[in-house]
Amino acid sequence: RDKLINAINAEITVLSQNVIALRSPMANDLRLILTIFQNALNLERTGDLAKNIAKIIVKNDLVIDASARDKLEKLSDAVLQNLTDVITAFNSLDEAKAQTIFDADKLVYDLHDDFSSSLMQRIKNDDAHSETVMHLLFISRHLERIGDHAKNVAEATIYAVSGEINQLDVFDDTQFEPAIYKFADDGWGDFELHATSLSALGYFIPSNAVFHLHPPYATFVFCDSPPVEPA
């Protein structure tokens, strides 16, 4: 399916370029073409994220308890609803419906934040299924990113209708969610990297960092801001 999505996106790109080059659309027509082009790109990226989630599920034997499953299902349902609503809004060029996506996206962010925080706590507590927890963190992040793409489609739809560039994101760019930073195996060997050893290599490690070894290839660092590489 992802290959089909990619092919359709490529076709839309070519058609959009041809219309702009050959017909020189103006005003409403130009905004609509630009919106179609942008929305196709956002939906293609959504397809990539869905594929990433599918790969995680297929390639790993995930052990998901009832609490985590409940949080994941709530997040998934909210993201799917936003995606469905925003596509409906775009198809009908319904500006009012597109505006509702911004409030709905706050729910997605809150559900993602709650789910991620609970998973981070499990890692700190040395959960027996830490590998599953790591994969769930990736899945949660992918779902939250799909929600962001739905919001992008809403912004583009509003632009197509009114010409206004809508920037209603209430979250400050300086607010960091817990993120995963991966240190690939660059000859450090198959041993557990921790704050002391990374610091010895010249990295500045935030005080809230949590480390998880994923042998033999990499260590994952969970923290609110990226470790600073040595100069």
Image: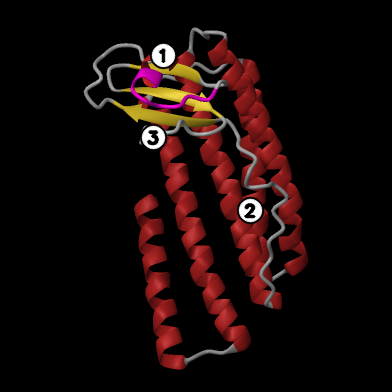
Badge 2 local density, few (<14 within 10 Å), some, or many (20+)? few
Classify 46 as above or below 61. Answer: below
**Vertical side of 77 occupied by 9: above or below:** below
Secondary element at tag 2: helix
Q: Is residue 3 visible?
A: yes
Q: Nearer the viewer, residue 168 or 40?
A: 168
- Residue topped by disc 2: 84
- Give the x, y percent position of residue 195: 44, 16
Q: What residue did someone put label 3 on?
A: 55
The residue sitting at the front extreme is: 231
| Region of the chain picked out in magenta, as a range | 199-206
Image quadrant for the C terminus?
Answer: top left
- Give the residue at x 38% y 70%: 11
- Res. 95 mark: none
Residue 53, how many percent across, how many down? 46, 36
Q: Residue at x 68, y 55 (%)?
A: 85
State yes or no: residue 204 in magenta. Answer: yes
Label 3 vs 1, first from the N-terminus? 3
- Name the residue that disc number 1 marks: 196
* First along the sequence among labels 2 and 3: 3
